[in-house]
Amino acid sequence: MSYNKPLPKLDPLTTPFWEHARRNILALQTCRACNDAHLPPSPVCPKCLSTDQDWKPASGRGVLEAYAEFHRAYWPGFNDDIPYSSAIVRLEEGPLMATNLVGDTTNARVGKAVEVIFDIVSPELALPKFRLASDD
């Protein structure tokens, strides 16, 4: 499988996120001290500065906070996807997540419910993307 779009750089801090995503699980780093769920991952909790953190599955649901439809490919790998949408989703658990909005975006509006899907781009990597929720 060949994927010619930009890919995330995995490091010790982000690897658990990507390991969960490969199993079709959207996971959030969560502080054991104050229960704050956050993205991006951090060596300390951004709320209480505790280093006692773990990864917990998220609901995979959220609300569209912002999106933009691109009609120009800034990387050659996106040529076949034009138009494509980038989005900011507020996850049900609270954090904001930069992502892509996929599927039929005709009814996309700020405030619309969205749900995660996973785009398997290699045997090692699946990218979480969002689509409009079917029950919205």
Image: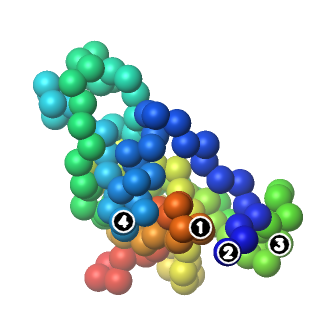
Secondary structure beneath dot 4 equals: loop
**Marks 3 and 1, the one that precedes in the sequence:** 3
Residue picked out by circle 1: 122
Task: Classify residue 93 as left or right of residue 11.
Answer: left
The 10 Å Cα crowd at callout 4, few under 14, some 14 to 19, many 20 or more, is: few
The reply to whether dot 2 and dot 4 touch (C-beta < 8 Å) is: no
Label 1 – label 4 distance at C-alpha:
13 Å
Query: Residue at point 63% right, 66% down?
Result: 85
Task: Classify residue 25 as left or right of residue 7.
Answer: left
Tell us which disc is closer to us: 4 or 3.
4
Front in this rendered view, residue 24 or 123: 123
Front in this rendered view, residue 20 or 98: 20
Residue picked out by circle 3: 79
**Marks 3 and 2, the one that precedes in the sequence:** 2
The reply to whether dot 3 and dot 2 touch (C-beta < 8 Å) is: no
Secondary structure beneath dot 1 equals: strand
Residue picked out by circle 4: 23
Image coordinates for residue 19, horizontal then vertical, percent: 40, 54
Label 4 – label 3 distance at C-alpha:
28 Å
- Quarter occupied by the C terminus: bottom left
Task: Classify residue 95 as left or right of residue 72.
Answer: left
Label 2 – label 1 distance at C-alpha:
6 Å
Front in this rendered view, residue 90 or 24: 24
Label 3 – label 1 distance at C-alpha:
19 Å
Which quadrant would residue 100 be assigned to in this image? bottom right
Residue picked out by circle 2: 1
Q: Is residue 73 above or below residue 66?
A: below
Q: Amino acid at mark 4?
A: Arg
